[in-house]
Every structure is written in structure tokens, then in C-alpha cells.
Amino acid sequence: MTKPLRVGIMGAGGIARGAHLPNYKKMGDRVQVVAVADVIEEKAEECARIHSIPHFFSSLEEMLDQVELDAVSVCTPNKFHAPATIAALKAGCHVLCEKPPAMTSEEAEEMARTAKRQGKILTYGFHYRHSPEVETLKRFVDAGELGEIYASRVYAVRRRGIPGWGVFTNKELQGGGPLIDIGVHMLDSALYLMGYPEPELVMGAAYQKIGNRKGVGLMGEWDWKNYSVEDMARGMIRFKDGSSLMLETAFAANVEKDDTMQVTLMGDRGGADVFPLKIYQEKHDTLLDITPAYLPKKNYHEVEIERFVHSCLGLTSPLSTPEQGVILQRLIEAIYQSAETGEAVKL
């Protein structure tokens, strides 16, 4: 029997407790979560007690120095993704880093270089890639059912969904608001389905119109007096192959639905909306709407953790790559840069 993968968790907050830890446990004897670290030691201790983790620490350095690990889940605020990931890779660990990859494209590039140099797996928490809708549509795309995908649209918009917990509204720790938090999921899903084309030109706009004043919160009360991120971002990306992508994302916007996450693809042989999955084609002089009769219902995070563990054990390959993380980070950075300067950004 293969030895279990020895995993350490960096960051004992909500994403670690709600997504990583319970799904590592579902892997049974293939995984042992042996340590957790958090800069607030009491959080690490509490997490270790609740989840029966034998070791807890107040720093990643202590954890890497004192416990033998094969892999690390990086579940910190965005500001600490790069340093934690690089340190874990240098210590000989595979890394699953939560999204977004980093705060800057330079950090993402250094993370990719380190993973390559160390010969270790680095993959990111783009859990929507592991949804049955995306997995199914990818098979159709790869089989040529949509033909040449020349246009796509990304939509991740909440009516009043500013998180009332964590550091989601703190630009210094997060790097931005909805674009870097929820928009990144739909953007990655679209790019993945399109084959991650190379970007050429980016235009963006960002707005802070609602989050910096008191209002109705559908995800708890947020600290509106210290709200430092955008509450809406919009962008357009043109790729070197001639295709384009339109993006809209918001924590708060005056729209009808409370929460919408959607990717739309348009190809010369077919198109699709992803959530829920519907494919549009023209065949035999007939316009068709195609919907799957059945899709498996499995938690996206569960599939993500399972794939990460299996890739660390050499049973499969990771779904997202460090190079894709670099492209994604460049696009996020370029949208923010264009929004700030009012000019298009060439990549």
C-alpha cells in the first residue's frame, strides 16, 4: 500500500475548515493531515483540536521545520499566498494554493519558477473547474462540438453580497474585491474552456459606489467605514488568436438576482451557458438547445482535493498549472491597471 500523503495546512480560517480539512478527511487512509499553522496561534490550536490534528504552530516556518510534510494547503489571505507557497515548495512540498495565485504577476512568476526548479506540483484552488458542468462542457469543446470559440462572457455578480467576515474588503491583504475573489473563478473557468489563449490587450473599469456606505447586507454586515476595494469591476480582453472575453463582477450592484455565476461561450459551430449547462447548436436546418439529462452531483472542493492528492501520489496530473496561474494573475493585474489609468494595457 502507498504511504499516506502527509499534509500541512497554512491558515486556519474559513476556507481551510470549510473546504480543505473536511475533504482531506474524505480521502481516508490516503491522507494524514498532521499539522496546521496560523499567525494567530489560538486559531491553529482550536483548529487542531476540532479536527484531531496532532501538531499546531504559529508560523509556516515552524511547521516546515518541525514536521515532515509531503504537501501543504495554503489558505491564507491573498497577501501571503506567494511567500507561503514559495517557502513550502523550497521545503520539498507539493502545494495547493487557494485562489488567486498571488497579489502580483511577478509573485506568480516566482511561484511558477520555484515549482519548476524544485520539481514539485503547484496547483491553485480554482474549484469551479471541477464542477460537472465545466468537466462535461470541456469534453464537448475538446471534441470540436463548439468549433472555434471566438467570444466568451464572464459574469459573477451579487446584488448585496459583500462578505461580512474575514478580510475580503481589505485591499492591503486581498489586493482587490470581487474581481480577485469571485470573478477570478468564472474568468479561470472561461479561460480553461477556451484553452487558456494568450492575452494581447486588456481594458478595465472599477467602481466603489455601494460598499463604502452603510446598507443592506445579504452576507452579514461589512465594515463600510474601512471598505477599501472595488464593489464592481468590468473588463474586456482580446487574445492573440483574435478571440475576446467580456467580464463583469460585483460584490454589490443594483440588479435583480442575489447571486449569479455564469460563463458563456460562443463558437462557430455552437455555444454554451455553463451554469446550468445548456449547449446551443444548428444541425440539419434546425436550431437546437441541448441540456444534459443527468450530471453527477459532487462537491467541487471535494473533487479538487481528491485530484490534488492523486496528483501528489502520482496517479494523475493536476488540473491547473503554475503557467496558467501566471496568465490569470497578469489579466487581473491588467484590468486593475487599466481601471486606474483609464488606458488599455498591452500584454
Image (cartoon, grey):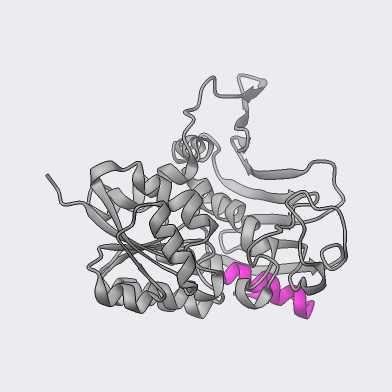
Relative image position of residue 21 (x, y in whole percent):
41, 51
In the displayed structure, does residue 251 sit left or right of residue 286?
right
Quadrant location of the C terminus in the rendered image = bottom right
**Residue 206 picture quarter:** bottom right
Above or below, 293 against 218 in this view is above
Instruction: Identify the residue shown where x is 33% and y is 77%.
Output: 62
Q: Tell me the quarter of the picture where residue 191 sits.
A: bottom right
Does 206 sit above or below residue 276?
below
Q: What stretch is highlighted in magenta?
A: 330-346
Image quadrant containing the N terminus: top left
Q: Nearer the viewer, residue 142 or 180?
A: 180
Q: 226 or 179, which lies in front?
A: 226
Which residue appears at 70% of the width and 55% of the height? 246
* Residue 322 coordinates in the image, percent (x, y): 41, 66
Residue 158 painted magenta: no
- As drawn, 283 above or below 88: above
